[in-house]
Amino acid sequence: MAAKGFAKFIIVITTVTAAVMELVDTSIVNVALNDMAGSLGVGIEDISWVITAYAIANVIIIPLTGFLAEYFGRKNYYLVSMIIFTAASYMCAQSTGLVEIIAWRFVQGVGGGALLSTSQAILFDAFEPKDRPFASGLFGMGLVLGPTLGPTLGGYIIEHMSWPMIFMINIPIGIIATILTITFIDKKPNEGKNKESIHIDYTGIALLMAGIGCLQYVLERGEAEDWFASDSIRICSIIAFVGLIGFITYELSIKNPAVNLKVLGNRNLAFTTIFTFVAGLGLFTSVFVYPVLAQRVLGYTAYETGLSLLPPTLIGVVMMPIIGRSMSKGGRIIPFVVAGFILFAAYSWMSSRISPDVGKWAFFFPLALRALGISMVQLPLINQAVAGLQPKDYPSGIALNNMIRQLGGAFGIAMANNFIAHRYMQHRTDMVSNLYDGAAGFVSRTGNIAQNFITNGGSDLTTATTKAYALISNAVDRQAYYLSYLDTFRLITIFFIAVIPLVAFLKTKKPTPENKAAASAAIAEAH
């Protein structure tokens, strides 16, 4: 039964806040790695495991949320996940060693992974079936805001406080959300009372954990470990391959699988997962590439980078409930998807053509296009994922769609890291090939810079020349990175343009109000 009045308002605030909190934690630590490494006495490559551990836990638990919510009861599972997330946040803040914080970060990811899908289902239950597309719009606000708010909030905390506060801010939010969950969120009829009739697919869960966990590790750590030159990457690649093949084969062969892969036989869901993968790639990769471009080339601080992302992102936040309302009134899904992908492609193409000498707000218009594109894609794809499925197949369809989005983001970041590294070396080699003692431009530039150091800095000729070489080398580095980031934006554009023709394979029949209401109700029941 849908909630009314103040109870509905509280449920909306609780579920959206929980989802935002989980998504913020996927990116908030990115700007704090240097401070954390220095505080714990480890290298930057070691401390980056706090990102990897959270991502691995997330991507393992997300496809299992439907099964776990059914087994333990949705409210119980949501409540325990909230407590785990909050307690692990406190332990992360109190950690004094690398292994300790990595372990607690993994636990935090286990708790956080449940918050996303379960929050959506609880939010859906608070609305009548006909209004659930609008509820999806409200939830979509969190999907857009969370990953972008992370760097802004993290940058502010690092500039004004210390890194443990990145985790401590979750504690009052988590406590309040826990109390509100206990007070205002009701259990579904017979929730968690049918454990005896539920088959636990231990083999499937183990294969999923091994396959997806190792795949996520390879994607997250491949570039840092020099890919297949590393024993750990080779071993994890083999485990990922064997685990995923075994998982697919086993799940397709048993009656009660942990994740029902047979739903991918539905053409609509199969092609929707492709769009979802690319959307996840664009969302997470853009939040990764733009901040490093802004800080490494444009000279922004972490806080300034976050602030530059925030205003255009708010456009997408405002658009989400508008799109949800439009879909409630019978708006077609596929035009939104096409428009969203075109807008995101326009964002990445425009970003690939911006000069390194631009002002602070030069990216506002491209980032506004990105926000509009994401808002037009996220919500329709959530609904499109289950179009054509039987209600009993909704849990598996939604879980797979959410997992594919996370994998798209992991793949995108790994791809961007690798692509940037290779393009940087290529651009730097090309530029350095023109810098030799006989090159008139190089000799003239070096001489002018050295003379400036002699005149204004009091350096001798040898010292001034060495400083001039170092300055030119830094400029070459900056330009090589700048060009590699532009290349990466062009690559993202190709992904978004390439998948647009696949809309021809999506279900295009306009659903009746009765079918939409039934589908929305089934989505709520699916979790």
Image (cartoon, rainbow, N blue to C red):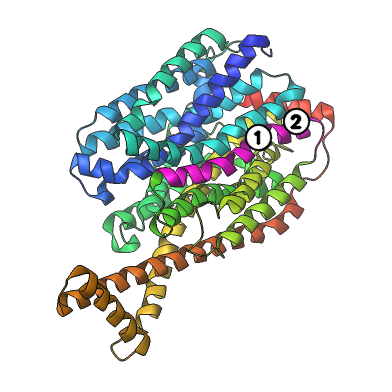
- Does the magenta-highlighted stretch encompass residue 350? no
Q: Earlier in the sequence, mark 2 or mark 1?
A: 1
* Residue 175 percent across, percent down from the top left: 41, 16
**Closest to the observer, 261 or 287:** 287
Report, in whole angstroms, how far the alpha carbon at label 2 lies from the one at label 1. Answer: 12 Å
Residue range in magenta is 303-331
Q: Callout 2: helix, strand or loop?
A: helix
Indicate left or right for 163 with 184 as reference. Answer: left
Residue that lies at the very extreme toward the bottom in this rendered image: 438
Q: Do the residues labelled 2 and 1 touch (CB within 8 Å)?
A: no
**Closest to the observer, 390 or 291:** 291
Q: Quadrant of residue 159?
A: top left
Figure quadrant of the C terminus: top right
- Residue 325 got which mark? 2
Q: In the figure, 417 relative to 514: above or below?
A: below
Mark nearer the viewer, 2 or 1: 1
- Residue 318 got which mark? 1
Q: Is residue 69 visible?
A: yes
Indicate left or right for 112 with 523 as reference. Answer: left
Residue at 46% x, 58% y is 415
- Does the magenta-highlighted stretch encompass residue 325? yes
Residue type, numbered disc 2: Arg
Residue at 34% x, 89% y is 439
Q: In the figure, 230 relative to 1: above or below?
A: below
**Closest to the observer, 345 or 404:** 345
* Residue 38 percent across, percent down from the top left: 21, 44
